Image (cartoon, helix red, strand yellow):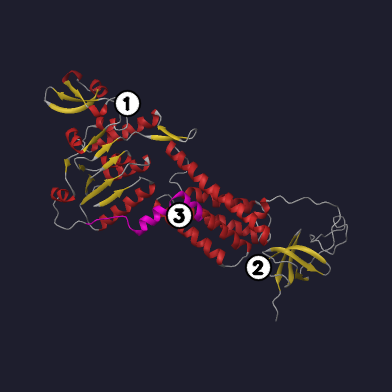
Amino acid sequence: MIEFEGMITAGLEQYLYRKIEQAREQESDLLVLRIDSMGGELEASLNMARYLRNLDWAHTVAYIPRQAISGAAITALGCDEIVMHADAVMGDAGPIVMDFLDFGFRHAPEKVQSDLSRRLRDLAETGGRAPALAEAMCNNKLVVFRVRHLPTDEVDFKSEEELQASPEPDHWQKLNPVLESREGKFLEVSGLRAVELGLADAVVKDAMELKKRFPTTGGIIKFRWQFVDSTVALLNNPWLTGLLLIVGLLALIIEFWMPGIGVGGLVAALCFAIFFWSRFLGGTAGWLEVILFATGVVFLMVEMFVFPGFGLAGLGGTLLVFLSLILACQSFVIPQTDTQLNTLLQTLMVVVGSGAAVIAGSVAAGSYLGEIPVISRFVLQPPSTGDSIPEETPVSPLTDETSNPLNIKPLNPGDIGVSASPLRPAGVVRVGENYYDVVSEGTFIEEGKRVKVLRVSGNLVVVREIQDA
């Protein structure tokens, strides 16, 4: 028996798959899904219904003690049997989407309803239930009739369209309409009524009576929400996801700012490990997203420590990191439905909002702690107010007289100087009486340390700290 409760999401879908796999490992041959849900995401509901319908190693039963509304009713239709409490309710699976003009919900367009109607008819027909009744759960314009087949005296439930499309329409007699399927209403029925209509197979008082209906030689194994399942669901919450991304990105920037495997690197690694772990178990991330993220970080490191200057590597790394985070938060690449479009918009709000918060926080911190690499390149610097270079102003290693009107001595590999500011890795060194913009090899160099020029390429000067003997 698997407890299936709460809002249906991609996380709940993955929870169900994990529990079913555990049941398979236990060699179970009877699988009872205890459903108590008001529904949720349409795509996840249809995925679970198809999964249950195609399950061939166990007999599946949907046990509804209280309610299975909307997506939960769709999931129940995928089971071999449906057993309900007499007062439990099932149905009302009309698809809805959010209207971004007034941020309210409205019924989905005809295209979505038509596709869902076909899918529910297929599920019902596979389970031996009347397809018209299943369709009436999502089509509030459909009226279903109780009908009798005159040659065989068989009683069934069909819509007017089904009767007219049958090979011999005159052989069917309409008895009375099903009240719950009247126009303007999505079909929703109680347990007793569901049995009368053939949507459910039996009514039981409680779990004990359910157990008597399915006698077993072994005990009942119950799968409930555990700490890991609750943690995954919590971490997939948009607000907590945003907080995790903000902390992780800030820690990553701090590590770039002060290189070396320190606190920033450890915190960033922990945050993104938790993020991708929760998305793996949530069913929205795979190894592709991890590879994209790692590649983006490598590109940023190349930009920071090998070829400084916000160029192709920095831009590509930034795009790869944000692309990996967006893909990890959803199970699709390009949205095909309104539900997927809503998911994409929510993901963009979380990821882009987190990035904006990180940039704002980094710029604010930079005003107190000094220039932060990469982030500082997003900030416009004030223009120079004069043509001359003030005394002790850092200058680039100019190499010819035409571009060096002050005759500042150019730097050469092997020159020795002193760091005039911390190098993180960018900073300023003093060689003789002149000051120069430089970058270290990648390690942090404190102010006042002796450094040696390793190489000069245009305006790029790379230095290394000289360790005292």
Label 3 or label 2, whichever lies nearer to me, is 2
Quadrant of residue 367 in the image?
bottom right
Label 1 or label 2, whichever lies nearer to me, is 1
Amino acid type of the residue tagged 3 in the rendering: Trp
Question: Is label 3 in contact with label 2 (beta carbons under 8 Å)?
Answer: no
Judging by the rendered image, the residue that carries numbered circle 3 is 287
Q: Is residue 226 magenta?
A: yes
Specify the quadrant that holds the C terminus: bottom right
Judging by the rendered image, the residue that carries numbered circle 1 is 184
Please give the count of numbered marks on the rendered protein: 3
Label 3 to label 2: alpha-carbon separation: 33 Å
Residue 155 is situated, as x and y percent measured from the top left of the image, at 15, 28
Which label number is shown at residue 444?
A: 2
Residue 26 is situated, as x and y percent measured from the top left of the image, at 24, 58
Q: Tell me if residue 288 can be seen.
A: no
Q: Main secondary structure of the magenta part?
A: helix
Q: Tell me if residue 260 can be seen.
A: yes
For disc 2, the neighbor class at 10 Å (few under 14, some 14 to 19, many from 20) is some
Amino acid type of the residue tagged 1 in the rendering: Gly
Q: Earlier in the sequence, mark 1 or mark 2?
A: 1
Q: Residue at x 17, y 40 (%)?
A: 201
Say whether residue 440 is left or right of residue 317.
right
Q: Is residue 186 magenta?
A: no
- Tell me the SS state at disc 3: helix
For the record, the magenta segment spans: 221-244
Which residue is situated farthest in the bottom direction here?
A: 469
Label 1 to label 2: alpha-carbon separation: 70 Å
Quadrant of residue 120 in the image?
top left
- Tell me the SS state at disc 1: loop
- Tell me the SS state at disc 2: loop
Label 1 to label 3: alpha-carbon separation: 46 Å
